[in-house]
Amino acid sequence: MSDQGISGIVSSILHRLGALASAHLGHVLAAMVVLLAGLGLAWLLRRAVRRILRRQPLEVDLLVSRLVYIAALVAVTFWALATAGVHIAAIATLLGTIGLALSLAVQSRAQDIVAGLYLLMERSLRVGDQVSLRGFSGRIESIGTRTVLIRTDDGMELLVPNTVIMSEIVVKTPEQKPAAAPANHTGAATPT
């Protein structure tokens, strides 16, 4: 093949690509507008969710608002790709397969997170509660989305997965309230 033949082929390919690019330029610009508007809407949605959940513990607020934001970004990305003319069926299938594999891989972590959200929202256990579990006794120091930190009576720290807390019997010792000060003859409490 001569140099003239190769340059002719390259010129033909470039000409076709230029025509294709100009035909799709409107779609690409529309996709950019959709993407920018979608990013703004996702941000507003995240703020609205945070406002709705402001009375919930911070861990719940942050986790739920992040999940909503990520879901909105994924939806906006697909919408922008479809607007640009990209056939998203194959991409969606691939992402679905990857999502299934990841969900199976992190199933126990996801169970811990769901149990943690339930613990944080139900508030059946609180920081400072005295509890007994699996032969250990101690005070709850923190409740997170994956684990509960218990400091035992002898100073050990136990990180207990939330699924264990939810699936086993946890004995919660009632809080010891200080005894009332004895009253003097006038009926007023005496200092101790």
Image (tube, rainbow, N blue to C red):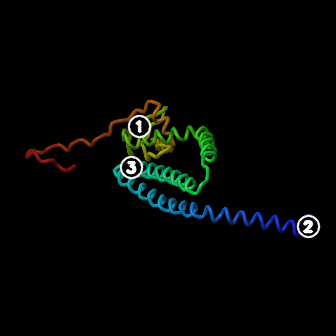
Residue 138: percent from the left, percent from the top? Answer: 44, 40
Looking at the image, is mark 1 or mark 2 nearer the viewer? 2
* Image quarter hosting the N terminus: bottom right
Say which of marks 3 and 2 sits in front: 2
Q: Is residue 81 above or below residue 176?
A: below
Q: Residues within 10 Å of mark 2 (few under 14, many from 20)?
A: few
Q: Mark 3 and mark 2: span between their CA atoms?
A: 73 Å
The residue where tag 3 is placed is 57
x 21%, y 42%: residue:
180
Tell me what residue is drawn at x 38 percent, y 35 percent.
172
Gap in Å between the C-alphas at discs 1 and 2?
Answer: 85 Å
The residue where tag 1 is placed is 131
Marks 1 and 3: which is nearer the front?
A: 3
- Going from the N terminus, do you reach mark 1 or mark 2 first? 2
Mark with earlier residue (3, 2): 2
Residue 158 shown left or right of residue 98 in the figure: left
> Badges 3 and 2: C-beta atoms under 8 Å apart?
no
Which residue type does callout 2 highlight? Ser
Give the labeled residue for mark 2: 2
Mark 1 Cα-neighbour bin, 10 Å: few <14, some 14–19, many ≥20: some
**Would you say 108 lies left or right of 64 here?**
right
Whole-percent x, y for residue 89 in the image: 60, 45
Q: Look at label 1 and name its amino acid.
A: Val
